Amino acid sequence: MPLAAPRTFRTIFISDIHLGSRPAKAEFLVDFLRYHDAETIYLVGDIVDGWRLRRSWHWPQAHNDVVQKLLRKARKGTNIYYIAGNHDEFLRSFQGVHFGGIVVADRAVHEAADGRRFLVVHGDQFDAVVHNARWLAYLGDKAYDIAIVVNRLIGVVRRLFRRPYWSFSSWAKVRVKKAVKFISSFQNVLAQEAARAEVDGVICGHIHHAAIEEINGIDYMNTGDWVESCTALVEDFDGRFDIVTWTGIATPAAEPRPAKVRVRQEVSEAA
């Protein structure tokens, strides 16, 4: 299989890496960053999983490689903004601080190449469960851990039969009625916040569900995650946005997403 050709975008948006947690697909992200550059990178929250690290320390070399890769890009001139999320909320007390050229913020406004303006925010501030019932959020986090274990078991079996990666937790999330209702409600609330901020759209993470939608005249875009789907939102130099699915090192392309989501799928081998 040929190596993927390096690509440069105007902007890359990445969220929900969850470094410090065992499910984080850090090797996939390092591979993605090897082949993709941008003038600006937004890290849209939950990059480091402080919740998991408080429970037990887990920081393998691949997680360190992600940090080093980002710092190296910052040193070479890439503008990198770190928007704090709920799992790395400890960074919200460092707004405006630079760490190795990476600027920490709670939210930002991104101006696209075509002049449109987008609110960039992780999104947990508009999740009623996280905001008002933290104990329930922690309980949901444990349930998510179980779903990821199921993912791993299914992944082992599928690899034995040379089948492409498939996420059980993603599949369940979009098919359970309450989960679908939650995703829809989350999207609507974020679109309303963008309208209040008098911008053209919103770019967020948090719910691990990549999407590009138009909601009541507002462009809603979600970056997805690097635990299940390994997706990033990218902006071309003409202001066009797409979702890139990076299915991993020498892994067949993932199954296509729903029709409303414009997806560009790419595959690489280790360099």
Image: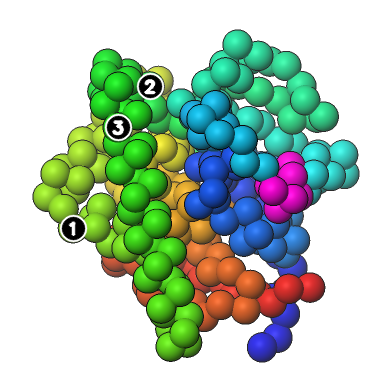
Which residue is the site of mark 2? 125
Pointer 2 or 3: first along the chain: 2
As measured in the structure, the alpha-carbon distance from the residue carrying label 1 to the one carrying label 2 is 25 Å
Secondary structure at numbered mark 3? helix
The residue indicated by pointer 3 is 139
Percent of width and height locating residue 180: 19, 48
Q: Is residue 187 left or right of residue 30?
A: left
Q: Nearer the viewer, residue 187 or 99?
A: 99
Tell me: residue 175, above or below residue 138. Answer: below
Could you tell me the amino acid type at mark 3?
Leu
Q: Residue shown at 74%/68% (left/top)? A: 6
* Residue type pointed to by label 1: Arg
Image quarter in which the N terminus is found: bottom right
Nearer the camera: disc 2 or disc 3: 3
Image coordinates for residue 134, horizontal then vertical, percent: 32, 20
Split into 4 quadrants, where in the image is the C terminus? bottom right
Residue 13, position as x, y percentages in the image: 57, 45
Residue at the spot of label 1: 175
Residue 258's tag is none
Magenta stretch in the rendered image:
60-67
- Badge 1: few (under 14), some or many (20 or more) residues near its Cα, within 10 Å? few
Residue occupying the point 16% across, 53% down: 176
